[in-house]
Amino acid sequence: MKRILICIGIALLLLLLLAGGLWIFRNRILNCLAEKKISQIEQRYGLEVHYDDLRFEGTGCLFLNGLSVVPEERDTLLTLRSAMLNLGFWQLLKGNIEVMNVAMDGLTVDFVKENQKANYDFLFRGNLNGEEKMERPAEKVGYDRRVQTLFDGVFRLLPSEGRLTSLHIRERKDSDSVSLYVPEFCIENHQFRSQLTFVEEGHTQHWETEGEINAGERRVSVSIQASELIVPYIRRRLGAEVAFDRLCLSFTQQKGDGKIVLLGQTEVDGLKVFHRRLSPERINLDHGKLDFQLNVETHALELDSCSTVRFNDLQFHPYLRVEPPSHLVASIHKPLFPAEELFNSLPHGLFENLEGIRVEGELAYDFELDADLNCPDSLKFYSDLRPQHFRILGYGTTDLGKMSEEFEYTAYENEVPVRTFPVGLSWNHFLPLDSVPQLMRMAVLQSEDGGFFYHQGFLPDAIREAMVYDLKERRFARGGSTISMQLVKNVFLNRRKNIARKLEEALIVWLIEQNQLTSKERMFEVYLNIAEWGPGVYGLLEASEFYFGKRPSQLTLEECIYLASIIPKPKHYRSSFEANGRLKENQEGHFRLVARRMAAKGVISEAAAEGIDLSRVVLTGEAGKCFADSLSLSTLQPVP
């Protein structure tokens, strides 16, 4: 027993001596470890890292003074006058870094890029010494574990107490620059408050920020406000402008059944967005709010349907599920609600023609999308806006019923007006619908929109097929437009070619069709009289004369189908012909398809459909002369 006690005593003495040695030589050990690590980093990334002083004071305070990081042959990336971090010496030895308190002064970070050389490009390249580590195949880590690891690290390093002074972050690319200056950032009992100053292209703005960082409760919140806060970088990088008066974000991390749950809220006031591809005007959203539950699973991210989106007077519950890399599921189901909530909430600048519109009644909306990029044909799409006792009390900036009467139409090329004419009997090239031969009417309908007189502006199957095609092509190649949609685009939105136009187009089509603001017959009549049929050629009467030197009543079956076939690309009619002036053989499939559809409708016989002959399409009008002139010019040989 005595020997055991003696051994225990010796062991304790050795431990005390070891601890004492570590304590006495802690700074020497710290500097040796730091210099070894710095040397590895310098060799790996081509950096010069220097510090004046690195030491522990007491049992847990780490002091660092005079730090600088300079990439080889580049501008200085980082400098730091002084920093004190309360880490805990013994915890640090165990590799468990947890920042309890921090005081930092004079941190400056400069991101500089000149002539394609940047002082931060080492972050995106491999080791300079050319050595490559042999790594085992990486185990695929689930999104829940990644998020958990991220939050564990962030909450460990974010202090509950601290003070940062004179923080500068600057970015300069050639002659463009932006800088952030924080005179003082204080954290006290998890709460923080600070002022930020941004300077970009000579414009200075001051932000007020406050919030909470609570590692114990796994909660973060931040609020930013200014008279009109303009988000930096966006204009220079994307040619856009995003501004707001106040932005708040807060969330709490919770653990669910086999997943991580983030419960939170984000809210924005006075949001203003501008980009010419979105809208020619600033888009203004007075107030927007999202109460969310984000579920992070092993192989998917999910916005729970208990989440609520509010913008202005409208609110709804979206559902979104993303299963990377290719599967997306989204849905919205909103039961009956007052219609004015939707129209009063439309962002200013996004729906120019509908601003000021007054409505009454109720609406219900359902939307479903299930898309897999790896299997486009399996796509599911459904969208339906249903009215109940809905009616328009007064138009806004635009008379949506103007097509019912004669009106002035302006054609545009690249958003520049090229021609204006009345759509009615006062125009000598106007063709009333009852003067359009049945062959021509049916050829256009079966080529462009066979269900025009039966649908209410939209063909869900056509939209779905267009989406499938676009997914396969990995670009926006097909739109699934109906005649109603093409008509609204030309009459109301011709000057605007942007993303917002598609949203406004859909809503105007729905309003015209649901409320029968213009009859189907009149809509089709307008369409045939304003459609572009070639360079500077508008309406069926001009098209018939331009291509065949005839009145529409004199057109043959093949000529009608030809005119209908070039509506999608009227300026490229020459590409349909061979050098000898005959239609290309690849046109035959479309001709026969349209002819069979016309036969199924009883407009022509099956024998006539089978007897379609492309050789009967001969450009005898002005188009033939233009085609011949261009052909002769292309075959002229240069004079020696």
Image (cartoon, rainbow, N blue to C red):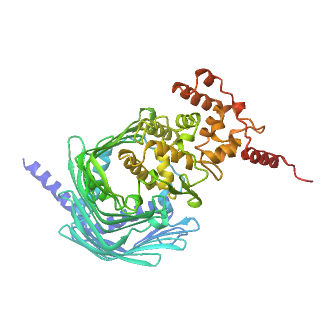
> In the figure, 173 relative to 342: above or below?
below
Which residue is more in the foreground, 8 or 260? Answer: 260
- Asked if one can make out residue 350 in the rendered structure from this viewpoint, the answer is no
Q: x%, y% of residue 103?
A: 27, 73
In this rendering, would 342 be left or right of 44?
left
Q: In the displayed orientation, state which residue is furthest to the left.
A: 1
Residue 424 at x, y = what percent? 53, 52
Nearest the viewer among 177 and 575 is: 575
Compare residues 29 and 349 and report the one nearer the observer.
349
Image point (71%, 43%), residue name: 549
Give residue 600's position: percent from left, percent from top.
Answer: 52, 25
- For the image shown, how many numbered marks are present on the structure? 0
Q: Is residue 571 left or right of residue 485?
A: right
Q: Is residue 418 visible?
A: yes
Q: Quadrant of residue 620?
A: top right
Residue 525 placed where, x, y %?
51, 45
486 in relation to 412, above or below: above
Query: Which residue appears farthest toward the right when viewing the image?
Result: 640
Image point (69%, 31%), residue name: 614
Residue in the foreground of this view, choosing between 256 and 480 = 480
Residue at the extreme top: 607
Going by the image, does 599 lie left or right of 328? right
